[in-house]
Amino acid sequence: MSLNSYKTNKKLVDKISAGIIQGKVFHAYIIEGDSLSDKEGFSKEFCKAIVCKSKSGVSCDQCVNCRKIDHDNYEDLHFIESDGLSVKDEQISKLQEELKKKPVGERHIAIIKDADTMTARAQNRLLKTLEEPFAGTVIILLSENRENLLATIRSRCVLYRLECSASNMSGNEMAEEIFNAVSEEKNFYELKQILNKWVKNREDAFVLLDGLERLYEGLLVGNDKRNRLHRREEIIRDIELIEEARRDLLAKVNYQYAVKNLIIKIGG
């Protein structure tokens, strides 16, 4: 693969490639996208594009650096993900120790998955590195919701948003049917039937939450004319309930319970 394989994000890929070719690689990035968007895969291709020996800005998939990243054994690539429900302070501390060392190649690259789950202490610790970055180091934060990151962290990163792939669009259909059913005050038995039709596993549950979040964000910013029927406080409350359900899923709560509990609360 390469960055060029992300066809639905062509404009973003072109922007990233041009920056790398021109030598304009920033020290920190936030890659934001829905839970089912391939943020991790995209970030690895981003790394390959930076360090590729043959096709800088895209990657060749053949050179030693590309092959090492593909096989997760590139010495200067550091990967962190949440330990349980969050990325902890100790994990960021260990990363900082690694970044202080001289890289084997030209630069250290760090990918922090679930960055928006970092504890307050972890974020404040990372902020010190973003304020005084180690020479050549690139830190990539993967996030579903950048608003969960400190404003001071966001201000020190370049933000890239991955567009929804076609496979995620079914989440919009799910969200529309369930939202309409709740608005029409259908009884729980009818709502349960709709959920059973759409949500058959944990992955479906995440797709539903992504669809609902997009729908409610449209209501919040006024892109959806139905926002006249919903008070701002109600919309914000429901978005918070969606995030609560997402945290339940990430904590391995039964997916059926998580989505049914969400719909009951939204239906109020």
Image: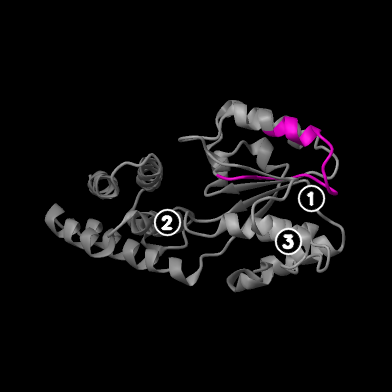
Q: What residue type is labelled 1?
A: Phe
- Element at badge 1? loop
* Measured Cα–Cα span from mark 2 to mark 3: 32 Å
Residue carrying label 2: 210
- Point out which mark residue 178 bears: none
The image quadrant of residue 93 is top right
Q: Where is residue 222 in the image (x, y as percent from the top left)?
A: 46, 58
Q: Earlier in the sequence, mark 1 or mark 3?
A: 1
* Measured Cα–Cα span from mark 1 to mark 3: 20 Å
Q: What residue type is labelled 3?
A: Cys
On the picture, is 196 further left or further right than 127? left
Q: Which of 74 and 120 is in front in this view?
A: 74
For the C terminus, which image quadrant? top left
Nearest to viewer (mark 2 / mark 3): 3
Q: Where is residue 207 in the image (x, y as percent from the top left)?
A: 39, 59
Nearest to viewer (mark 1 / mark 3): 3
The image quadrant of residue 175 is bottom left
Q: Residue at x 38, y 63 (%)?
A: 171
Residue carrying label 1: 26
Q: Which amino acid does label 2 sit on?
A: Asp
Q: Which of 88 and 64 is in front in this view?
A: 64
* Measured Cα–Cα span from mark 2 to mark 1: 29 Å
Magenta-highlighted residues: 95-113
Residue carrying label 3: 66
Q: Which residue is drawn at 44% across and 69% down?
A: 167
Q: Position of residue 235 (x, y in %)?
A: 38, 48
How would you rate the neighbour count of disc 1 (Cα within 10 Å): few for under 14, some for 14-19, many for 20 or more? some
Residue 192 among those drawn in magenta: no
- Element at badge 2? helix
How would you rate the neighbour count of disc 3 (Cα within 10 Å): few for under 14, some for 14-19, many for 20 or more? many
